[in-house]
Image (spheres, helix red, strand yellow):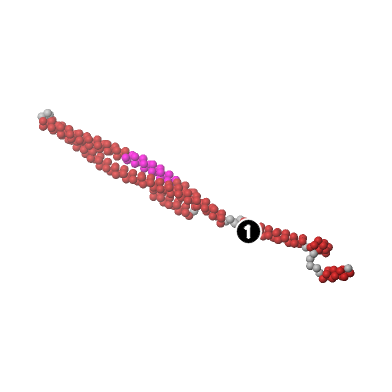
Amino acid sequence: MSGLFQRLFTWGKSEAHSAMDKLEDPAKMAEQGIRDLQAEHAKNMDALAKVKAQVIRLRREMLTLQETASNYERKAMLLVQKGQQGALDGAEADRLASEALSRYEDAQTQANRLKADLENMEKMAAQLERNVQQIKSQIGKWENELRTLKARAQVSSATRKLNAQLASVDGKGTIAMLERMRDKVQEQESLAEAYGEMAAVPKTVDDEIDKALMGGGGTQTDALAALKARMAAKD
């Protein structure tokens, strides 16, 4: 399961680098993969709890059998002592001591078997717990990496859109339209200036005479100078 998810997550990372605008689907798939792994982790935790419970039960049974075996051995020794001391018939003491020893051996055999089972179960529990902790740690790492990738995806997407806008800022001919408007304005300004110059130019001889009388006369001609000389001579 973890190997499959690792390949899925790696593919999601590759998609994030090659097609950030399509990251949403890989992100959702990665999130679903993490949720599935968390569900499996919960099952593994339940299995680990059951294995540990089995270990506890076996240990208790083993200790109980060891205690039972010790009790039978102690009783056998007491029976032998009573027989030797005459407190109990020797043959009866030996018979009962033999029965006690037989039960001691049965209990001890079962205790030894449970001890072997317990050791194997403890090894399984330890290995399962290591795997569970490793998966838990890996899930945490993948969750952090997914959050980082999603944040990077958002920044990259925003940056890509902004750069696209900057790259296509004249995509609709805005600059060209401004250039044409500038040329049009300059043309209108030049035309207005030309009309102004035309308005300042006298249109008739009377206009020129009136302009000269108003003090705006231009350069005197030879004919005008001769006229003034004759007028002065008559005076």
Q: From this viewpoint, is residue 70 visible?
A: yes
Task: Please state which of residues 140 and 56 is positioned toward the viewer in this rendering.
Answer: 140
Instruction: Residue at the far top: name it.
Output: 87
Tell me the amino acid under the disc marked 1.
Ala
Residue 226 falls left or right of residue 165: right
Instruction: Residue at the far right: name it.
Output: 234
Compared to 152, does 216 lie above or below? below
Q: Main secondary structure of the magenta part?
A: helix
Residue at 70% across, 61% down:
190
* Circle 1 residue: 176
Residue at 82% across, 71% down:
222
Q: From this viewpoint, is residue 95 visible?
A: no
In the figure, residue 208 lies in which quadrant? bottom right
Residue 202 falls left or right of residue 39: right
Task: Give the residues in magenta.
Answer: 32-52
Residue at 64% across, 57% down:
178
Residue 231 falls left or right of residue 130: right
Instruction: Residue at the far front: name it.
Output: 235
Task: Please state which of residues 96 and 214 is positioned toward the viewer in this rendering.
Answer: 214
Residue 113 falls left or right of residue 187: left
211 part of magenta stretch? no
> Quarter of the image containing the C terminus?
bottom right
In the figure, residue 100 lies in which quadrant? top left
Disc 1 residue crowd, few under 14, some 14–19, many 20+, Cα 10 Å: few
Q: Could you tell me residue 204's position as x and y percent?
A: 82, 63
Q: What element carries label 1?
A: helix
Residue at 49% across, 49% down:
24
| Total numbered circles | 1
Task: Please state which of residues 20 and 168 is positioned toward the viewer in this rendering.
Answer: 168
